[in-house]
Image (cartoon, helix red, strand yellow):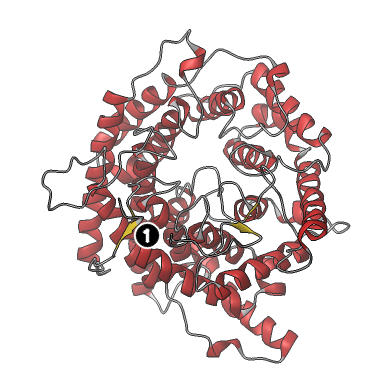
Amino acid sequence: MAPQYYENQLDLITLDDEALHQVLRELQGAVKLAANIIKTHAPEPLPGDKNAFGSIYNGTLGVALMFLRLQQQASYVEDGDEVPRLASEFYDMAYSRISYSVSETSQLRPGRLSPLGSSTLGASVLRVSAAFAGPTLQKASSLDINMLKSAIEFAIKQGTAVGGDEALYGRAGLLLALLQIRQQCTDEENTAALTPVFTMIPRLVTIIMETGKVGATDYQNLYGGQDVLPLMWPWHDKYYLGAIHGIAGILSILLACKPDELDDGTINHIPIIAETISGLCRLTIENGGNLPSSLPIRSPSRYAPYVQICHGTPGMLILLAQARNNTQLMRSFWEPDWDKAIRIGSREVWERGLLFKGGGICHGIAGNAWPLLLLHDSFEYGKERTELAKLSFKDRTGSDASAEEELTPEYFLSRALTLLLYARKTPPFHRRESRDEREFRLPDTPYSLFEGLAGTCAAWADACVVIKARLRKKELDNEGSGVSFEEIETDELLSKQLQQELGFPGLTLGGMR
């Protein structure tokens, strides 16, 4: 029987400048080779065959999203005069893989409102993104804007009906897509056209939050008070905790909202979000660094706990990286258990993250590496926020948090890059050449965004941006005694680089906030 994962005996890469430049070159080469493989094996469908485009999760639309991301990041995967040509090529490959057959709003379904899983909404979101990303700025189609408006109205109309809020198929997935479109929308004409959609975001946030409270009450009625969390969202009658179908993903997306969308002075969602995060940390710590896949916790099985984004600790690490980037949350609610969960959780990801399932981002090696990239950034660029959080914790509790073992950005980056380089040994990027090589499973959809090579390629490209930003910050550090957050924002090059980190598809917003 195939193993669930391989023992990790990899040597950590070093992070000196020479080593980082070498890793950068290797990842750049991997991105360009992967893009060519995907171009060949995931060709554009016939324009009239709208059923051939599938979803962002595992269809051609996800490949289109990968190419749109690569267009934005072309200057990080190529150097010099070739960048414009490569960016144009990436855009063309994205454009040809987006369905331009607009569906009727009557096709919207409860519990199927996330653009990740809905081909109808996925196509609308990508058409809008492509309009903003093209060689010349275009106006978003009124049909697509109407589709998005109908989707958020429909989502709000569902009220607190449970079962349709997770990232892959539910309302949280719709929320993140709208936040991304708002982030991409920088011109007055498109902003004016989309404002009726954007103004409904706070109502959607409140509905998702209220549904989480209903879910928690339902859970307590079913199973009693043990392990009940303040916010719980069921999916298919199970209370999942991970990123794709569970609490960690929903909270990660909620934390991507603007501060006044989480606390408008009348309704403050931050305290209950923080309390739920603390509960998830407690569960992670009690289970040796493993976030249970769902509650109630099942009796021990013959299998080791999942270490993958969709149901395990990596999704928890994404949530904690997002939490660390939220100033209000950190200042008022951070506690040492958050960092303890990060420390023992990241240890589990490193030790058991070489999954037999391959290199993908939903349940593969690249997906396990990506949270470590996000944690690197939160520790590298959030040092002042962390110090303020520790001081605030001491003021609230009288306890000194400095005794907790310190985590460093280097700890996360060395492990993330080592895993990402190793992901090059998985199919379809690599063909096993001898029986002595480890065998990895070919994904069901080998070139897709979440299961296949497109997602791995997106992770490699994001890592290229992370490396270039780190090298730039090191230059600034060498010029003085350290770089403050204000200096990061005012250094044009570093600020631009951090904005080009696009984050985990479907779960994080990307960019420095």
Report the front residue among 40 and 470. 40
In the rendered view, would you say 14 is above or below 37?
below
Q: Is residue 512 left or right of residue 426?
A: right
Q: Residue at the far top: name it.
A: 48
The location of residue 156, given as percent across then percent down, is: 80, 36
- Picture coordinates of residue 95, whole percent (x, y): 43, 21
Front-most of residues 166 and 96:
166
> How many numbered discs?
1
Task: Specify the quadrant of the image occupied by residue 328.
Answer: bottom right
Disc 1, SS: loop
Specify whether 269 is left or right of 35.
right
Regarding residue 316, the answer to whether it shows in the image is yes
- Eyeballing the image, is 127 above or below 180? above
Quarter of the image where the C terminus is located: bottom right
- Residue 231, by quadrant, is bottom right
At a point 62% along the width and 51% down the height, the residue shown is 246
Closer to the camera, 184 or 318? 318
Residue 134's x, y, as percent? 46, 26
The answer to whether one can see residue 493 in this image is no
- State the residue position of label 1: 353
Residue 182 lies, with reference to residue 239, above or below; the image says above
Q: Residue furthest right?
A: 266
Instruction: Assess disc 1: are there few (<14), some (14-19) or many (≥20) residues with their C-alpha within 10 Å of its C-alpha.
Output: many
Give the amino acid type for the residue marked by disc 1 in the picture: Gly
Residue 223 drawn at (x, y percent): 76, 60
